[in-house]
């Protein structure tokens, strides 16, 4: 029974995320009618809290209508995201109820749980003035939830003995939260690349003009990566402790272990790159995106292509 | 971490023409310990680790490596030559991480020196022009300048700043723990590597299959498979025995994930130092015996059979371990009776825990033994001299053997036994299948440096958190020329809230001033101190 409602809630959330994506896309499209903005001269050092809105140029009267429309679509997108997230949350909780255990025992459950964290982070940000991340977050949520309900889905079942451990909670939650933060950080890095390219052209138009300065986006990207990195380190360490109990060795170069180390090393490279002349800015952002690609490959590619000790329960 | 090298090294002066020996060494050292090299080595490490996850690796799946080489002789031979089948033990992989660690040590040692010297250092002198700093508040001059500086010392001290009183100003700094965390993190990585090296030098790992009702003693000869580090000595093996009383396995019988494992529990009796105790061994609950741990890493079926020769003498009796071939535990093995006379006997065995006959081919449809059947074919041949050459117990070498055939003599003899059944072979010998039993694969291991590894990781994570979450900040207050200025500087990126903190400090000082110093925000200061994106038009 709970399983039926969980599935229904998951599918609903995927559909409503799609609607939110449409609304956010409309917001970006409507913003194209906005007047182009001259790039700010120089970049400010030091930044305030995350609560401020973006650079608001003095609106011309003809510009006003486009601005209102843009804002309306943005609000619609956020509202739909809230609804979708509520349904998503219900789906994850009911899944746990149906299985009578924590709902992250297979690929389907991990994706839905991690996406729940991603959107939760976004919602916190959105109510602190960072609604502009809506389009990429909604896109990620649609792809994630969509793949989960169509491709990765497996029916509820108890866990195999290898997962009967307290580390099942610690290791996987740490990995899911770190993964969510890496994803949000990666989205900021993508937007940073777009915005900084626009700034170099000294003329930004459309939605990019509504975004804060590239240095502010970079700072947000850094904060999320800086939060996720120690957590990811911890997730790997917790996994090693668990592996020592379950498999009698804390590190065995299992494909999943290898790729989590690769991901870790790339993100370590990102943090170092930010402190190296010639690597700050664009290059560091590219490294962060490569790190995210590694994370995704570790999750999707390794699960589906390579057999290893982390293969459980269908996929 | 993030500011392992905050400033770039000044471009090194290169002597025209050739470098002298010491200069060349110095140049190389500088290059190796530079941040850029560290970055390149990090990426090289990430890249080098990848092939090992995509190609089969000898330590974990030797069979698949053999298959790969058999299927692609040329490519496989090349991969083998460059160590791609054992990436993580290859010299080039070791070269990358060792260089990385040398680079790390070379970078971190000078910084430890700098940190220790700076540990008791005072905050820097107040800059001449505070208005140029990223955050700046201009306030009205107070009546009592010295009193304001006194209370600023108190306020900043309460906010955990290290405070230095200067003639007309107060200089304050906090966040010294960031660099400490950074250093601790990198030093723990070195300890981590030492712990890993320790474990792999002095550790050992062996596996052994034990059938229900049998025991295992921790001596070298009893292992089926054993690997140990270079510095390991056999006397390190703690003498203990483990007896497997029973092994319980349960599988999913419901519609979802039918056949998936649900419970594995081994009931064991262990003897260590003469102390006998009964312990349960499960997947996530290894046995700890001395400094060794015993893990449950696999299981399978064994068949208990008795072979009698035509005279009725027992030629073989006992459980024979069979190896599972698929998820439903279709298991294969060999029953050998080399001492049967007049001819030695051997049987190829196929055990089906839940047998199902599909088109004359026996398969197993469930991993539990719900409908057990033992399929056999039989061989006979002249007795062989005992040569002492070890034989594979799981496969049959049929040289010198002839297969029994059916009465018509045209087809090889095949027969199926259920538990308890006996089969009479054409030559008068018999084989009886008493019952099936389970066996477990036990992994016995000891990793001496384990505690060092885990403490290093723990400390590393703590250091990492300090280095990423502590944000060093400097604040100055100057009372001079009828003006009071409060200014701040963040020494790391990704930090907001500097202006807020300045305002809070100003508030606290204002309260201390009891309204005497009326606070005025200079228009220019608002712009300067305003947050990003504001005041930019």
Image (tube, coloured by chain):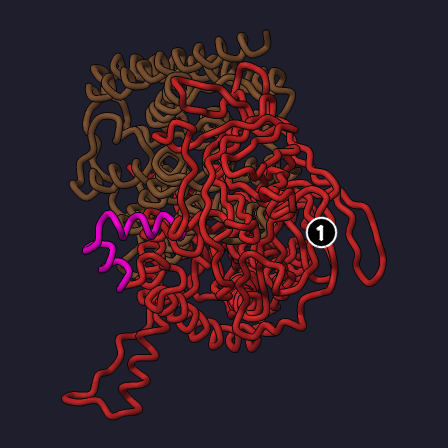
Q: Which residues are magenta?
A: B61-81
Q: Percent x, y for residue B1?
A: 46, 59
Which residue bears the numbered disc 1? B215
Q: Percent x, y for residue B437?
A: 65, 36
Q: Percent x, y for residue B84?
A: 31, 58
Q: Colour of chain B?
A: red
Is residue B75 shown in magenta? yes
Residue sitting nearer the eye, B300 or A78: B300
Residue sitting nearer the eye, B7 or B442: B442
Q: Name the side, left or right, on which B316 lies relative to B529.
A: right
Residue A214 versus residue B51 in the image, above or below: above
Q: Name the side, left or right, on which A241 lies relative to B30.
A: right
Quarter of the picture containing the C terminus of chain B is top left
Q: Residue at x 65, y 46 (%)?
A: B313
Quarter of the image holding residue A59? top left
Chain label for disc 1: B
């Amino acid at each position: 029974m709970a399983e039926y409602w969980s599935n229904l809630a998951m599918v609903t959330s995927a559909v409503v995320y799609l609607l939110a994506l449409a609304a956010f896309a409309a917001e970006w499209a409507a913003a194209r009618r906005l007047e182009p903005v001259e790039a700010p001269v120089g970049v400010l050092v030091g930044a305030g809290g995350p609560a401020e809105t973006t650079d608001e140029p003095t609106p011309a009267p003809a510009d006003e209508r486009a601005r209102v429309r843009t804002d309306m679509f943005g609000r619609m997108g956020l509202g739909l995201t809230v609804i979708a997230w509520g349904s998503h949350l219900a789906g994850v909780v009911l899944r746990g109820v149906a299985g009578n255990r924590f709902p992250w025992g297979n690929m389907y459950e991990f994706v839905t749980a991690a996406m729940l964290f991603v959107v939760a982070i976004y919602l916190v940000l959105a109510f602190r003035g960072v609604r502009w991340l809506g389009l990429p977050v909604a896109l990620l949520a649609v792809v994630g939830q969509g793949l989960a309900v169509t491709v990765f889905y497996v029916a509820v079942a108890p866990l195999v003995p290898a997962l009967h451990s307290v580390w099942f909670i610690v290791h996987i939650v740490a990995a899911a939260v770190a993964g969510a933060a890496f994803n949000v950080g990666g989205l900021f890095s993508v937007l940073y690349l777009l915005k900084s390219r626009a700034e170099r052209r000294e003329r930004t138009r459309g939605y990019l003009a509504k975004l804060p300065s590239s240095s502010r986006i970079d700072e947000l990207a850094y904060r999320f990566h800086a939060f996720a990195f120690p957590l990811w380190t911890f997730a790997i360490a917790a996994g090693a402790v668990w592996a020592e109990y379950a498999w009698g060795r804390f590190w065995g170069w299992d494909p999943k272990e290898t790729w989590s180390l690769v991901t870790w090393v790339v993100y370590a490279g990102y943090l170092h790159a930010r402190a190296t002349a010639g690597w700050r800015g664009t290059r560091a952002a590219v490294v962060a995106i490569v790190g995210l690609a590694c994370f995704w490959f570790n999750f999707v590619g390794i699960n589906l292509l390579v057999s290893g000790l982390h293969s459980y329960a269908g996929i | 971490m993030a500011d392992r090298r905050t400033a770039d090294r000044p471009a090194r002066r290169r002597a025209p023409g050739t470098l002298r020996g010491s200069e060349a060494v110095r140049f190389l050292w500088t290059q190796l310990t530079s941040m850029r090299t560290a970055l390149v080595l990090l990426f090289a490490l990430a890249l080098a680790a990848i092939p090992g996850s995509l190609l089969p690796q000898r330590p974990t799946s030797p069979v698949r490596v053999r298959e790969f080489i058999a299927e692609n002789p040329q490519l496989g031979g090349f991969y083998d030559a460059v160590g791609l089948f054992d990436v993580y033990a290859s010299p080039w992989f070791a070269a990358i991480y060792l260089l990385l660690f040398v680079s790390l040590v070379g970078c971190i040692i000078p910084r430890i020196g700098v940190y220790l010297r700076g540990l008791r250092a005072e905050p820097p002198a107040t800059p001449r022009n505070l208005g140029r700093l990223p955050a700046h508040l201009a306030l009205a001059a107070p009546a009592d300048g010295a009193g304001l500086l006194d209370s600023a010392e108190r306020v900043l001290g309460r906010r955990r700043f290290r405070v230095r009183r200067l003639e007309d100003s107060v200089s304050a700094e906090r966040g010294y723990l960031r660099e400490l965390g950074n250093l601790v993190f990198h030093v723990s990585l070195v300890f981590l590597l030492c712990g890993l090296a320790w474990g792999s030098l002095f550790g050992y790992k062996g596996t052994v299959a034990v059938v229900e009702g049998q025991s295992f003693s921790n001596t070298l000869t009893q292992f089926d498979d054993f690997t140990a580090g270079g510095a390991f000595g056999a006397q390190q093996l703690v003498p203990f025995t483990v007896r497997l009383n029973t092994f319980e396995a349960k599988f999913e019988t419901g519609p979802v994930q039918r056949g998936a494992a649900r419970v594995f529990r081994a009931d064991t009796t262990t003897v260590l130092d003469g102390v006998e105790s009964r312990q349960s061994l499960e997947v996530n609950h290894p046995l700890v015996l001395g400094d060794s741990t015993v893990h449950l890493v696999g299981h399978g079926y064994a068949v208990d059979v008795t072979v009698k020769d035509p005279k009725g003498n027992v030629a073989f009796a006992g459980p024979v371990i069979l190896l599972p071939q698929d998820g439903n535990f279709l298991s294969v093995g060999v029953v050998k009776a080399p001492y049967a006379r007049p001819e030695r006997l051997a049987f190829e065995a196929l055990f089906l825990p839940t047998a199902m006959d599909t088109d004359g081919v026996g398969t197993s449809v469930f991993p539990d033994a719900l409908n057990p059947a033992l399929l056999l074919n039989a061989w006979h041949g002249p007795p062989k001299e005992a040569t002492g050459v070890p034989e594979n117990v799981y496969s049959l070498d049929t040289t010198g053997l002839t297969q029994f055939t059916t009465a018509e003599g045209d087809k090889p003899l095949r027969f199926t036994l259920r538990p308890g059944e006996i089969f009479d072979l054409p030559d008068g010998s018999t084989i009886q299948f008493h019952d099936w039993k389970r066996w477990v694969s036990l992994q016995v291991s000891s990793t001496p440096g384990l505690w060092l590894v885990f403490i290093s990781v723990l400390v590393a994570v703590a250091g990492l958190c300090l280095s990423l979450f502590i944000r060093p900040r400097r604040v100055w207050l100057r009372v001079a020329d009828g003006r009071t200025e409060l200014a701040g500087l963040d020494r790391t990126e990704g930090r907001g809230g500097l202006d807020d903190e300045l305002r809070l400090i100003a508030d606290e000082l204002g309260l201390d001033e009891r309204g005497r110093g009326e606070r005025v925000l200079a228009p220019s200061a608002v712009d300067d101190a305003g947050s990003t994106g504001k005041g930019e038009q």
